Each structure stands twice: as structure tokens, then as C-alpha cells.
Amino acid sequence: MAVKDYLRERFFPHMWCPGCGHGTILNSLIRAVEELDLNKNEIVMTSGIGCSARISGYVDFHSLHTLHGRALTFATGVKLSRPHLKVLVPMGDGDALAIGGNHFIHAARRNIDITAIVMNNRIYGMTGGQFSPLSGPGVKATTAPFLTIDSSFDVVELAKAAGATFVARSTAYHAKEATGYLKKAIMHKGFSVVEILSQCPTHYGRKNKEGDAVSMLELHKTNTAPLGSKALKENPSLTPRGIFVDVERPEYCSEYDKIIDYAMKEAR
Amino acid sequence: MSDNIRFIQGNEACVEGALYAGVEFFAGYPITPSTEIAERLSQRLPENGGKFIQMEDEIASMCAIIGASLTGRKVMTATSGPGFSLKQEAIGYACMTEIPCVIVNVMRGGPSTGNPTHVSQGDINQARWGTHGDHNIIALTASNHQDIFSITVDAFNFAETYRTPVILLLDEAVGHLREKLIIPEAGELPIVDRLRTSLGKGVDYHPYLPREDGRLPMSDFGGEHRYNVTGLFHDMWGFPSNNPKVVNELLRHLVDKIDNNIESITRYKEHFLDDAEYVFVSYGSAARSAIHLAKTRRARGEKIGVLELQSIWPFPKELVREKCADAKAVLVVEMNMGQVLAQVKAAVRKPGRVFLANRIDGKLITPSDIKKLLRVIQGRGV
Amino acid sequence: MAKKVLRELRLNRDWCKGCGICVSFCPKNVLELDSKDKVVAVRPEDCICCMLCELRCPDLAIEVLTDQESDNE
């Protein structure tokens, strides 16, 4: 199937701003699904609220556009109910780690077979540019006119600590790499997290003098380096990209199936 | 002893009713006084091939059952006041997206933490108005275990019939009370299964286009029809829409689909109502005291009867008006500050003759509490 | 090994929002924005079919259609 066969073309052009990294992430994700040759009827995409969440309307899967921060909880219901379905959960940084932070760590702890994609543009775009828990200190936002003073989460470290069994990071600039990580994440059995750095030229770039989409993409290139690279060793302040965790651990739905087998035997 | 007779808690009677109705998925979070429902289902569901999950919080539990329902399962969660407050946004989502689910609220004192181990009926209005925006809701209740069982079955049946969340309002006293339950034989109570679309592969399916009879056939997530579900105003395909006509029709549909079926939804019992001069309107554990008092006063020749409501929302206004029409006085017996009282006053022809017999101190209202007020109304002194 | 050669650069002007990402990162300067800020292929003959414009396009407005050319060397 062609890439476009996975899109609901009638809703294009999409609603994201010119140069928004979220469009590129949609592009990477669709490509990953296409390259894996997945059956559209067996994919459920669950999203929350925000610019990121609108992604679910553009894909020709079963799509569930839910509440702010709660995408993973709806996804948990879908997955546990029908474990054969592939469940993809794209989330914004506020969606995933502010209002939805609790669900994020618990989904990771359970190791339920869901793919979480954190579309990290370090800002609340839909509401007009407020800082997020991934903005980090020194960022200008409409709710931080004197710059932010709070530290950010490191999505990779948080996901690792919470028990995610596949954790990767890439950027909208590294679209091919991101597609590769998404493919691995989708095929991984367990809770997988792919953080993709995205750019919001409209609200983040403008306020923080990072320029337009092109110059923000340049920053994805210059501010990051692959895990194990010489560049990263020489400059540890760079953000590492790559696959940080890829391990096996009992998956929640499979474990629950064992509970059912046991309980049914005992009840007989 | 026959193996379909149990001596159990009200919360367990609710579980048995849910299983009879075909519950397949439960997500919950521990909270007094509803916890026994989760505990019991954590055992009974997997024994029957169903799924139980203890989520990280009340919100997550509500959302998880909505997700599971969309894949074609009959679903339930259980909670109490604080958890019910937390679930409201997601209950609104289920209203808006028309996803069948049952939410049990075993009521305790409130607001806030209130008193987890003591009885109250303070969540009547929250069940109706707890979430934002215009919508409708079905809320049911019962006063004894046999009725809890059958009203739980009704709750699942209504959820499927009208594609709506249904709130089951139990209370601490009846939830923790132990008494006899006879489990009906299979087939004794009607079970409504999900109405699924008959449209095949490749045919354009409209998840939000009502049939002529007003019902909306569903299609399971994971099936042939890929559609969108959103809490935004949406069109008949489930895609967001700001079209004023679409929005107007959607909101009216959400209200009308329940209001137009109030007669089918209304559940009640009447006790000695025929020639009653004094009518108690009550529900839940409060109704047990009202019925007891009516029975003992009847034995002394006083014409007292009880209208026991088992469906609170949509409020059965016509029924209450009719049953109270000939009463000298109506006493609403409940454990709150008059939440059903306000509905009864609005329903009857002479609201000045409607009085409140209540307790709000965490103690079960007793027959003598009601009797004291009755004597004043009857002009027989305090 | 077979080498890709360009058959067509399919540019969807309705979807393109003119962000310029494809133009800036094209290694061969094949693309430009026109007076209406829509992408156009000004030097398609230079295209090396690296696909980066298609992969990075946030508007999903670019398709690089290729043919396989057998490598005779």
C-alpha cells in the first residue's frame, strides 16, 4: 500500500501551522506502519488533547480522540480488552507528562504492549504558547514572561525508571531515523516510548529567538548526537539520540491471560 | 440449600447482577465503601474469562472502561463520592461519544472526604449535573439485594439500548448490609446485547446516524469499520464539526434519546399506595425505613404508603405527580438536604404539601425519625 | 545494485504550506518556493532521489516517484 492509503486525505491540508514538526512525525509514523505492512483494521490510535492529539483524525485507523492527558488510560482499556490490536498513542509533552504524567509512568510500570510517542515541542501550542514540563529553565512562554524557573523531565530517563522496555529518542529532522525507531517500537512486545523532538515555530521559536522551522530543525541537528558517538563524548551537553532500552519483560496482557487460565481452572 | 441462594453484601449483589448481565471488563480503584465490588470482580471476572484491572486512579479507571467498551465489551467501574467527582470529565466524554458503560457510586458522606464508612445519599444531583455541558443521564438505585441485582441488570441493558453511561447509585448502608439474594435462572431476566451494525466491509458506516427507532448500531474497534471517536462536537461519521446545524442536532439528540424514553426507563415500586393519605417518596436504604414505618402504621389503621423510586434520572415527574395526587401530604425521605425533594416539589400540583424527612449526620434514617415529622404534619404534636 | 532514478516529483500545492524545509535541506537545490510560497521543482534533473524532502515534509505534500535503473558498471 502507498503511504497515502493510511491517511484520511479528505481532511488535508491538515490544521497544523506551516513548518510544525508534528506533521513530520505523522509522516514518519505513517511510513513506519506502511513499511511494517500492518492491517489498518488492527490498529487503534488513541490521542489526548492538544495540537499533537489531532494526529488521530488524519490516520485511517480506528481512532479515539480522548481527554487531555488520558490517552494512555483509554488505550489500556482497548489493549487489555483486545490484546491482538496494535495500539499507538501519540501525545504532546503536556499531554504525556504534565496532566498525563501519572498514566505515563503506570503504563510503563505495567509494561502493557502500547507504543507511546511523545511529540515533544516543549510548549503548549493549542492554547497559545505556555511552558510545559519539558520546556526546562530559561524559556520564554506566555505564562513565563520572565523566563521559566522549573526544570524539565528527561523523557528517556523517566520512561527507563518507570519500567518501559523500549525507549528511543529522535527528532523531526532525523525523520528516517525516527521511522526506524517507530518500527522497532511498534513491533516491540511491551510498553515502548519514542520521544521525537518536534518544533513549534509559531509559539516556541518566535518567543525564544530560535527562528523559523528551518532554523529550528537545524537545532535538532546541532543540539543532538547519536548514542555512543564521538560528538556526544566530546560534548555531553548534547541531547543523545538512539535506542536507550530494548529489553524483554513479562507483558501485562499476556500475564493477565495466565491469570484467566488459572482462575478458570480453579473455578471449574 | 439451593446453590442460587446467597447471603451476601449489597455490593456483592451488584457484582452478581453485573455478571448476569454479561459484564466482561472492569477497571477500578479502591475506595470505601465500594471496594468490595472491585475485590469480588477481580476474582469472578477472570473465572469467567473476563478482565479486571486495578488502575492508577479513578480517572484512569473510567477512561479504561470506555476504551474497552469501544472494542465491544460490556463494562463497569465502581466508586464513591470523591472518585465519582474525579470521573466526571470522562463520564461527560462517554455521554458525548455515546459509549455504553455502567458506573456504580456507593454513596458516602460528602463533600470532600466526608465520611467514607457512613451512609449518605448526597450524590443525587451530582449524578445528573456533575459533568459540564448539556446532556442527559440515566441513574438507578435500589433498597434491597434482590432489587440491586435486577437494577444492575437494567443498568447494563439501558447502557446498551441508549448508548449512554448509566449511573447506579447505591449507598453505604445497603452496600454493606448482608441479606439474602436469590440469583435468578438464566433467561429469567431479559438481557440486552449490543446492537451492532449489519453493514459489511466497504459500506460507509455512520457511527452517529440514528436509525428510525432512534438507536445507533455500533461497530467494534478492531472490526471492519474504521471510524473516529471524539469528545468534540462531531458529525455522523464521528469527525469534529462546528457546523451549527450539526452541533444543534447532536446536543438535542443526547438529551432527547433519554427524555423521549422516560416511560421505558422508569423503575419504581409502590407499597400500600392505593388509598394512602400520606405518601412517602423514598429510595435506597432510606426507603427501608419508610417502608417499615408505613407497614407498622398501616397495622394501626393509618393510611400511609410509599412510592419507592428506583430510577432517579430522568426524574419520573409524571409518575410522582400521579401517585401523590390524592395525598394530604408527601414526605420525601432521603439522606441529603433535599435533592429529590426539589424534584418532587416541582412535579406535584401542591408543592406546599411536600415535606422533607431527612438525616445528614452519617446515620441511617430510622422509622422513628420519619414518625416524628409525620406526627407534626398530622397535627398530633411532637 | 539497482540505482533509483527520478520519474516524477509529485508536489501537492493544495497541501503545501510553504515552510521551506524541503527547499533548505535539499542537497542539490532542486526545490524552491514560488511567488505564492508553494514548492516547485526548478532543477528536477539534479535530483538524486535521497527522499529527504518527502520524509521531512510536515504537510505530506511531496512524493518522490522513482524508477529502478540497473547498474551496468
Image: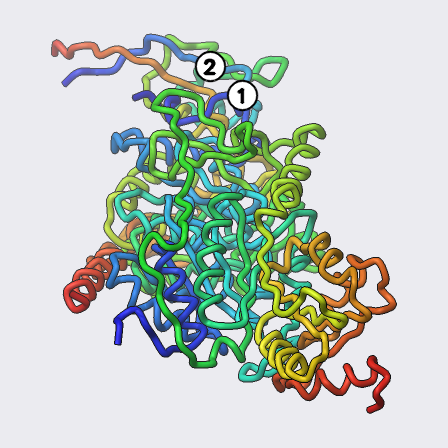
Using residue B329 as the reference point, say whether residue C50 is left or right of it.
left
- Residue toward you, B207 or B371: B371
- Residue toward you, A63 or B296: B296
- Above or below for C6 versus B151: above
**Cα–Cα span, label 2 and label 1:** 8 Å
Identify the element where label 2 is drawn.
Answer: strand
Do residues under tags 2 and 1 come within 8 Å of each other at their CB atoms? yes
Q: Position of residue A81 (x, y in %)?
A: 33, 51
Instruction: Quarter of the image for the C terminus of chain A: give it.
Output: bottom left
- Give the amino acid at mark 2: Leu
Q: Chain of mark 2?
A: C
Q: Which residue is mark 2?
A: C11
Furthest residue toward front: B301
| Residue B60 can be seen, yes or no | no
- Above or below for B169 versus B166: below
- Give the amino acid at mark 1: Cys
Q: Chain of mark 1?
A: C
Q: Which residue is mark 1?
A: C16
- Above or below for B213 versus B340: above
Q: Residue at x 59, y 80 (%)?
A: B119
Q: How is the image coloured?
A: rainbow
Q: Position of residue B171 (x, y in %)?
A: 55, 74
Using residue A237 as the reference point, say whether residue B338 is left or right of it.
right
Name the N-terminal-most of marks 2 and 1.
2
